[in-house]
């Protein structure tokens, strides 16, 4: 699920709430996290977004508390949930709508796990940061 979309003159950041269910009897230590967003009408490859940091909403405020993205493990036979901000190296505005995304993890044994999700982006979760880093709601 998309939490927020931040647009600046130099990058695009998408805050996602992700969940993984580990069906195995052992924890899965995550070595690498990757993601792709499939945009409508785009005749190119999907938009590659890179993990940037964890985030949490500050209660009763619009602010985000950001923390570094550290190594983590998926607990055995449990659902792991996290909120992660991803950054794009492309500068673009993503219109409101429904999009497919693939979140991929690679464990320390180089086994790849993929999770395809559908994101719903609405205008109210998008905001722009101008050159002075002021929020300007859309």
Image (cartoon, rainbow, N blue to C red):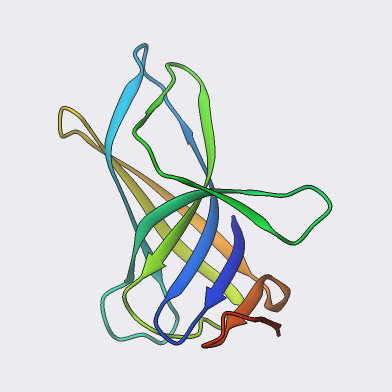
Q: Is residue 57 left or right of residue 15?
A: right
For image coordinates 43% across by 60% down, the residue present is 86
Q: Residue furthest top?
A: 25
Q: Who is closer to the viewer here, 128 or 43?
A: 128
For image coordinates 44% across by 51% down, the residue present is 53
Q: Residue furthest left?
A: 110
Q: Is residue 33 left or right of residue 37?
A: left
Which quadrant is home to the C terminus? bottom right
For image coordinates 79% across by 47% down, the residue present is 59
For image coordinates 56% across by 87% down, the residue present is 130
Residue 95: x and y in percent read 57, 83
Q: Who is closer to the viewer here, 137 or 65?
A: 65
Compared to residue 38, the image places residue 78 above or below, namely above
Q: Residue furthest right?
A: 60
State which quadrant residue 101 falls in. Answer: bottom left
Which quadrant is home to the N terminus? bottom right
Q: Is residue 58 left or right of residue 120?
A: right
Compared to residue 133, the image places residue 38 above or below, namely above
Residue 71: x and y in percent read 34, 33
Residue 113: x and y in percent read 30, 39
Compared to residue 76, the image places residue 53 above or below, namely below
Q: How many marks?
A: 0
Residue 109: x and y in percent read 15, 27
Q: Who is closer to the viewer here, 2 or 59?
A: 59
């Amino acid at each position: 699920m998309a939490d927020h979309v931040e647009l600046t003159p130099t990058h695009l950041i998408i805050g996602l709430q992700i969940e993984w269910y580990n069906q195995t009897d052992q924890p899965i230590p995550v070595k690498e996290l990757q993601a792709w967003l499939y945009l409508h009408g785009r005749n190119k490859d999907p938009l590659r977004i890179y993990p940037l940091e964890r985030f949490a909403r500050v209660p009763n405020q619009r602010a985000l508390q950001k923390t570094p993205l550290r190594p983590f493990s998926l607990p055995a036979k449990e659902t792991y949930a996290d909120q992660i901000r991803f950054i794009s190296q492309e500068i673009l505005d993503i219109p409101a709508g429904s999009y497919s995304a693939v979140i991929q993890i690679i464990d320390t044994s180089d086994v790849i796990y993929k999770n395809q999700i559908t994101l719903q982006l609405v205008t109210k979760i998008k905001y722009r940061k101008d050159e002075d880093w002021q929020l300007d709601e859309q």
